[in-house]
Amino acid sequence: MARALTPIRILAVDDHPVLREGIAALITRHPDMSLVGEAASAQEAIGQYRSVHPDVTLMDIQMPEGSGINAIVEIRSEFPAAKIIVLTTYSGDVLANRALKAGACGYLLKGAVRKELIETIRQVHSGARRIDPDVAVALASHLNDGGLSVREAEVLTLVASGKSNKVVAGNLGLSEETIKGYLKSIMVKLGANDRTHAVTLAQRRGIIEL
């Protein structure tokens, strides 16, 4: 008589209870999977991982008490073999690249959870990597981009909050001409028509978060 397979043990991390409930409902339909823990924040996720030692963790990015990416870094530093799938609404290449560099094995958009989650869990558990096709295209299309420097991202974040060049300069202890120079460089790097367009593109790609 064949021995029953041990279910894949899953930890679901998201600050929205409705999403966690939806994930739980999906998982319970599949006998090869078991939801062994839930968390609503990055810090809670780290504690739950230490407690339940899941086979696969589903991780949101934006949550209270720190980002999901920081949680991935901390979990992977303590448990290098941890298999983590990011579940997010953000398809930006920069954010995806940060998550993958932090150690995520998968990157799935929440809109595709119902159709793709179960197979993604199985593939990641088996040792494969899985990235949402739209995110993979975005990553490939910006593969050779230099990206914004830390200072440029800082300037653009302040601009995105509605501050004028003069106020941005005062906040950063720089001259207004220097800020203008940064904005010119930012627009060239992003292929933006103006500062508003630059903010939109940077948010879409996950370069800045508001």
Image (cartoon, rainbow, N blue to C red):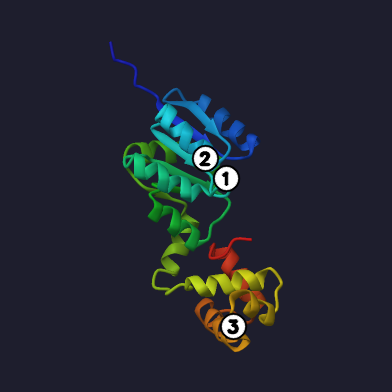
Residue displayed at 39% across by 24% down = 7
Q: Is residue 147 above or below residue 95?
A: below
Tell me the tag on residue 147: none
Q: Is residue 110 above or below residue 161?
A: above
Q: Quadrant of the N terminus?
A: top left
Is disc 3 surrounded by few (<14), some (14 to 19) or many (20+) residues within 10 Å?
many
Circles 1 and 3, Cβ within 8 Å, touching? The answer is no
Residue marked by disc 1: 65
Q: Quadrant of the C terminus?
A: bottom right
- Residue sitting at the far top: 1
Q: CA distance from mark 2 to mark 3?
A: 36 Å
Q: Nearer the viewer, residue 198 or 180?
A: 180
Q: How many marks?
A: 3
Is disc 2 surrounded by few (<14), some (14 to 19) or many (20+) residues within 10 Å?
some
Residue marked by disc 3: 179
Residue 42 is situated, as x and y percent measured from the top left of the image, at: 52, 42
Residue 137 is situated, as x and y percent measured from the top left of the image, at: 45, 62
Residue displayed at 63% across by 86% down = 176
Residue marked by disc 2: 43
Residue 208 is situated, as x and y percent measured from the top left of the image, at: 57, 64
- Residue sitting at the far left: 1
Amino acid, disc 1: Glu
Looking at the image, residue 167 sits to the left or right of residue 46; the answer is right
Q: Earlier in the sequence, mark 2 or mark 1?
A: 2
Circles 2 and 1, Cβ within 8 Å, touching? The answer is yes
Looking at the image, residue 123 sits to the left or right of residue 109; the answer is left
Q: Quadrant of residue 76?
A: top left
Q: Earlier in the sequence, mark 1 or mark 3?
A: 1
- Numbered disc 1: secondary structure: loop
